[in-house]
Amino acid sequence: MMDELARAMSHNVLDAGRVGMKNDDGTSPEEPAFISPEEGRLAIDAGTAASVHRTVRGIGGTVLFLAADDEHGARMLAHGLPPEVLLGTSG
């Protein structure tokens, strides 16, 4: 889904296998450690949703992300999804 969004916004599709871990403060570590493509996909999706949320909030809009289940929601939050956009989870 995020690949289609990237194309619709005239952005390049990101390679989930080239997503690096970030420090707790959001900076990159000295030596990058790439995460698995599955986890990278979550990070890209969470980052894209966060970016769109910031942009749309600036014009008075809202972005919502529907999680498949509680585990999916928790994993998206762990990868940087803003909690206020998350739907479909009990915690």
Image (cartoon, helix red, strand yellow):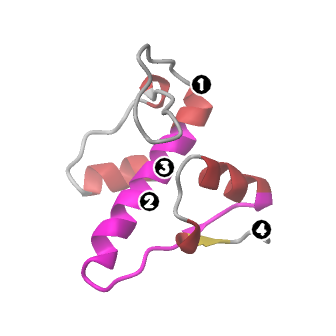
Extreme left residue here?
10
Residue 43 position, x and y percent, is: 51, 42
Q: Which residue is mark 4?
A: 91
Kindly identify the amino acid type of the residue bearing the numbered disc 2.
Ala
What distance separates the C-alpha of mark 3 from that of mark 1?
A: 14 Å
Q: Which residue is mark 3?
A: 45
Residue at the image position 74 percent from the left and 69 percent from the top: 89
Kindly identify the amino acid type of the residue bearing the numbered disc 4.
Gly
First reached walking from the N terminus: tag 1 or tag 2: 1
Kindly identify the amino acid type of the residue bearing the numbered disc 1.
Ser
What distance separates the C-alpha of mark 2 from that of mark 3?
A: 6 Å
- Circles 2 and 3: CB atoms closer than 8 Å: yes
Q: Which residue is mark 2?
A: 49
> What secondary structure predominates along the stretch shown in magenta?
helix
Q: In the rendered view of the protein, which quadrant contains the C terminus?
A: bottom right
Front tag of 3 and 4: 4
Question: Which circle marks residue 25 in the picture?
Answer: none
Residue 20 position, x and y percent, is: 46, 27
- Circles 3 and 4: CB atoms closer than 8 Å: no
What distance separates the C-alpha of mark 4 from that of mark 2?
A: 19 Å
Disc 4 residue crowd, few under 14, some 14–19, many 20+, Cα 10 Å: few
Residue at the image position 77 percent from the left and 53 percent from the top: 71
Question: Which circle marks residue 36 in the picture?
Answer: 1
- Where is residue 53, by image quadrant? bottom left
